[in-house]
Amino acid sequence: MEIYISPELIDQDKQILNIVDQNQQAVGFLSLQFDDKKMYIFGNLQEVGVKEDFKDLIKPYVNGMSKNKADLEVYSYVSLGGEKFDLEASEEDQKES
């Protein structure tokens, strides 16, 4: 299943992005809030089958946004159906923990 970012709100200090499938049905969301030296990320994915696609979609986006300001601290909580997963860890790393 293909997934895409569908912006809901983009402002100078915050963004709310829906994650939708090819039928424009929401499968998750990502929100980003910016402070002077911090970026807070909260996201949730409902469809278990697109976990790796979700990571592949949002990881470059988050990395690009974090380059906007020097010395930006990034705090994130991204979950799959309520269970936290790490954007940086591989699938095998997460099974072991």
Image (tube, rainbow, N blue to C red):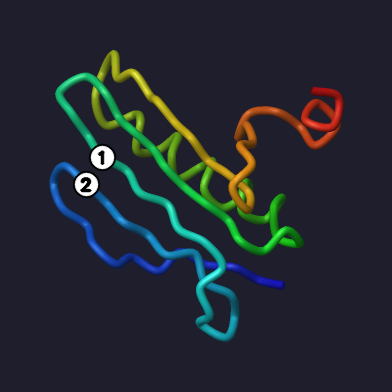
Q: Residues within 10 Å of mark 1 (few under 14, many from 20)?
A: some
Residue bearing the label numbered 1 = 33
Q: Residues within 10 Å of mark 2 (few under 14, many from 20)?
A: some
Instruction: Please state if 18 lies on the left or on the right of 85 as rendered.
Output: left
Counting from the top left corner in percent of width and height, residue 27 is at 56, 68
Q: CA distance from mark 1 to mark 2?
A: 4 Å
- Name the amino acid type tagged 2: Lys
Q: Quadrant of the N terminus?
A: bottom right
Counting from the top left corner in percent of width and height, residue 29 is at 45, 58
Q: Nearer the viewer, residue 80 or 87?
A: 80
Discs 1, 2 touching: Cβ within 8 Å: yes
Counting from the top left corner in percent of width and height, residue 23 is at 57, 86
- Say what secondary structure mark 2 lies in: strand
Q: Residue at x 27, y 32 (%)?
A: 68
Q: Nearer the viewer, residue 46 or 67?
A: 46
Q: Nearer the viewer, residue 36 or 80?
A: 80
- Say what secondary structure mark 1 lies in: strand
